[in-house]
């Protein structure tokens, strides 16, 4: 059974890596953005317990999965179930370069233009990662990673070993 959690800064490569794991091992892939936010303008976080309940529903329906996102609060509620934890932690400039090369994400934005309109905000958000003190910060991710007693790995660049395990 494979149950993999992947987290890190925005544009760190979480989704790319999750897709690779999902394809390699036929895992069900969950992007936590899909259950963390209300469908409002501007977007607002859902009640944490509502998101946790939806996450638990996903787990009840799937034995083998890869879950990725920036939400240490959500991930900490299920980290004990993970057979592997992956902290994708490249430097800020790598994340910014990744964001510039990001394809349109139709599950997040109604158009490529809408995604591009959000680009400057995203760059600012990426740059604040080491200084923020919320559930999406380097501090929260480091704590989640350091406290996990099981199998874990941290990647500090876009260069990663082939996924064989």
Image (cartoon, rainbow, N blue to C red):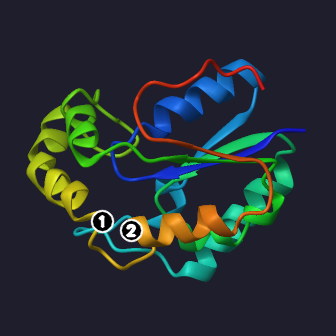
Q: Nearer the viewer, residue 82 or 19?
A: 82
Q: Secondary structure at mark 1?
A: loop
Local crowd size for mark 2, using a 10 Å CA cut-off: few (<14), some (14–19), many (≥20): many
Q: Are marks 1 and 2 in contact (CB under 8 Å)?
A: yes
Q: Quadrant of residue 25?
A: top right
Q: CA distance from mark 1 to mark 2?
A: 6 Å
Examine the rendered structure and indicate whether residue 151 appears above or below residue 53: above
Label drawn at residue 156: none
Counting from the top left corner in percent of width and height, residue 38 is at 41, 69
Residue at 78% in and 53% down? 82
The residue to which callout 2 is attached is 137
Residue at the spot 57% in from the left edge and 28% down from the top edge: 19
Observer-nearest residue: 41 or 11? 11
Given residues 149 and 71, the one toward you in this image is: 149
Residue 115 lies left or right of residue 109; in this view the side is left
Label 1, residues with CA under 10 Å away: few <14, some 14-19, many ≥20: some
Q: Which of the image's four quarters has the N terminus?
A: top right
List the residue tagged with mark 1. Answer: 130
Residue drawn where x is 33% and y is 42% of the image: 11
Is 81 left, or right, of 110 in this rendering? Answer: right
Mark closest to the chain's N terminus, 1 or 2 = 1
Can the viewer see residue 41?
yes
Helix, strand or loop under label 2: loop
Tell me which residue sits at (35%, 36%) in the image: 106
Quadrant placement of the C terminus: top right
Q: Nearer the viewer, residue 71 or 87?
A: 87
Residue 38 seen by the camera: no
């Amino acid at each position: 059974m494979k149950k993999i959690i992947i987290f890190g800064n925005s544009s760190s490569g979480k989704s790319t890596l999750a897709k690779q794991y999902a394809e390699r091992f036929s895992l069900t892939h969950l992007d936590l953005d899909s259950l963390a936010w209300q469908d409002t303008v501007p977007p607002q976080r859902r009640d944490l317990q509502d998101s946790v309940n939806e996450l638990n529903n996903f787990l009840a329906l799937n034995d083998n999965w890869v879950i990725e996102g920036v939400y240490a609060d959500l991930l900490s509620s299920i980290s004990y179930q993970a057979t592997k934890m992956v902290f994708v932690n490249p430097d800020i400039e790598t994340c910014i370069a990744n964001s510039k090369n990001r394809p349109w994400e139709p599950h997040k934005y109604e158009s490529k233009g809408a995604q591009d309109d959000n680009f400057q905000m995203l760059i600012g958000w990426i740059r604040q990662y080491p200084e923020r003190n919320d559930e999406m910060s380097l501090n929260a991710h480091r704590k989640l990673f350091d406290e996990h007693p099981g199998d874990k790995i941290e990647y500090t660049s876009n260069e990663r070993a082939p996924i064989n395990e």
